[in-house]
Amino acid sequence: MIPRETIDRIYEAAKIEDIVGEYVKLHRRGANLIGLCPFHNEKTGSFTVSPSKGIYKCFGCGVSGHAVKFVQEIEQCSYAEALKQVARRYHIEVEERQLTPEEQQRQDNRESMFAVNDFANKWFQQQLWETEEGRVVGLGYFHERGLQDDIIRKFQLGYSPEKGNPLAKALHKQGFRDEFILNDVDSKVGTGICGRGQQDGHLYDRFRDRVIFPIHSVSGKIVGFAGRILKKKDNVGKYVNSPDSIIYSKTRELYGIFIAKQAISRADLCYLVEGQMDVISMHQAGIENVVASGGTALTKQQILLIKRFTSNITVLYDGDAAGIHAALRGIDMFLAEGFNVKVLLLPDGEDPDSFARSHNASDFIEYIQSHQTDFIQFKVNLLSANAGNDLQKRTAVLQDISASIASIPDNIARQNYIKNCSEKLHVDERALAKKVATLRKESIAEERRQWREKKDSLEMSTPSPENAVIPEENKEEQKASDIQFLDLVPQEKFNDNYANLLRLIVRYGERPLYTLADGSTISVGDYILQQLRADNIQAPTPLYQRMVDEFAAHHTATGFQASQFFKFHQDPEISTLAIELIADKYQLSSIFSKQNISENVTQTVKLRTEEDELPMLIPRLLLELKYTILEQRIDEMERALREAERSGNWEMQRLLLADQPRLLEIRNQICRQLGNRVITS
């Protein structure tokens, strides 16, 4: 394990422009450098490198990061390997920390298991190509399925003989111990490449009499195997997979991801299929940006693995009932992670394997593009056909589609889908939007509840801002701290306002903002968090909350710098968001720093920066956040009033009308402080 001190030295030494410049031709544009993005195809450069901030950001495909992350992504290597590569470039000696006995044991176990899998993978291939049984049975099967030899070798396909336990014997001959050949269900140690007979206690080959599909991790290591039986046998499954272990879980891996990842990045699109043969046949047809879930239920871990390379997914499944069910199951999971989802069900009797064998790449892609549908059209077509004119079934269809739309994190995308769905289902757009908003509110509330149960309680120990010496021009804005928002629940519009404040915490969190009466100072981050806590305003997403909690827990550390802390955070989600918040698409031209003195004379003047404006900017952003919350609460109250009037609930009307003037007055106070027009009613 690399010590934190060494990691910090590597980060400090790394020059982002040097690292990226080895792979991308960069041109100076103001304070930044611009080039063609190496992660997607583009003709006009949108890949921006900021030497001063030590980050890169592509404003075309959205990728971003720091120097080590760039090496990790471009070389497709692990975080530790990327650190070592950057360290070598700057002649930094990496002395890994002495592992504890437990850590050393776990690392040794992993290395031994990978060694077993590597040996077994070569042995399976040897059996396929170099034995008569392998050539006749195994290679004959692959040829019968239309696979060419180069594709068979590319995917390292193999064969395990029918009789005896030759693999177990070969492993023993190489000195591998049983604990790594077998699999312990409790400790997850061992590959499970062999099992032990209950009666005689002898080892047997788990994959005997099967063709073998090795399963690679995203970095290319053999983590497990899938074996397909060639002869139909009673009470024997068609496929056998490696058991879960400390190096393999079928819920984390995607078949073909190691071979497909670069093609997925280039195309900015991934095709998802179900089985190994689907992937291999599509590769042979010339379509390489494809992975398989391996015949198991799709998981969030698999979806996030795809998201490392693209946010565009086309789901290709058989047109039978099982394929339809699998497609439906995966749609909402992809939507919840922000994917653009297309669905294609192939004609009856076809699967991606058979279709790829009868079409070349251009014909296959043309068919996909002309027959794929977005998820709404797919669900509308499928569910409406079953519902017919049955009112209850049509209501259930609308509920199902509304839930799918509600899971989409992007507000603009959600609005577009609401409009699209209302047109296709002939329902009122406002009613549909209200339904989606309700479902999303419930989902966010549940997500927050779960997050609060998991996170440790943090006590803020910073001084109260009540005695802060506030610049005279900010006293009106400061009055907003007297307005309590304990009974207000943030809604969707709230996200952007909160993100603006979070951006200032990441950029300037440790910087002094105001001087207190005793001469001490309160920082940007402390002040913002205290104001949010005073009005009981919660973060809109668990990720935002994690960043706030991290700042609260670490900002008092000696030498703390918020931008560095978050940019190089070990949580990749926090690091990625921090870089997004730090990145600037545009730089102010130096022409704006010139001031005319006379007709022919100019002088350079210092422009006021965002940091200069923080004492006025932060109170205003806090007011805008509270105004957004208040506007949503007033809208909710007006809807509740209309509903109470419609239903004749006079007591509810009385209560709402009694509270309405208070909210309107608070809104008018904020309007005056923001300099907006006061609304009277």
Image (cartoon, rainbow, N blue to C red):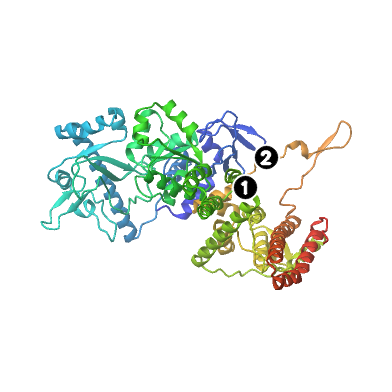
Residue at the spot 11% in from the left edge and 58% down from the top edge: 199
Left or right: 565, with 612 as reference point = left
Give the residue furthest to the left: 200
First in residue order: circle 1 vs circle 2:
1
* Residue 561 in view in this figure: no
**Image height of 550 relative to 604, above or below:** below
Answer whether residue 485 is visible to the viewer in this image: yes
x%, y% of residue 79?
Answer: 44, 47
Mark number displayed over residue 556: none
Image quarter hosting the C terminus? bottom right
Q: Which residue is mark 2?
A: 586
- Towards the viewer: 140 or 466: 140
Kind of element beneath mark 2:
loop
What number is the disc on residue 415?
1
Q: CA distance from mark 1 to mark 2?
A: 28 Å
Q: Pointer 2: residues within 10 angstroms few (<14), some, or many (20+)? A: few
Identity of the amino acid at label 2?
Answer: Tyr
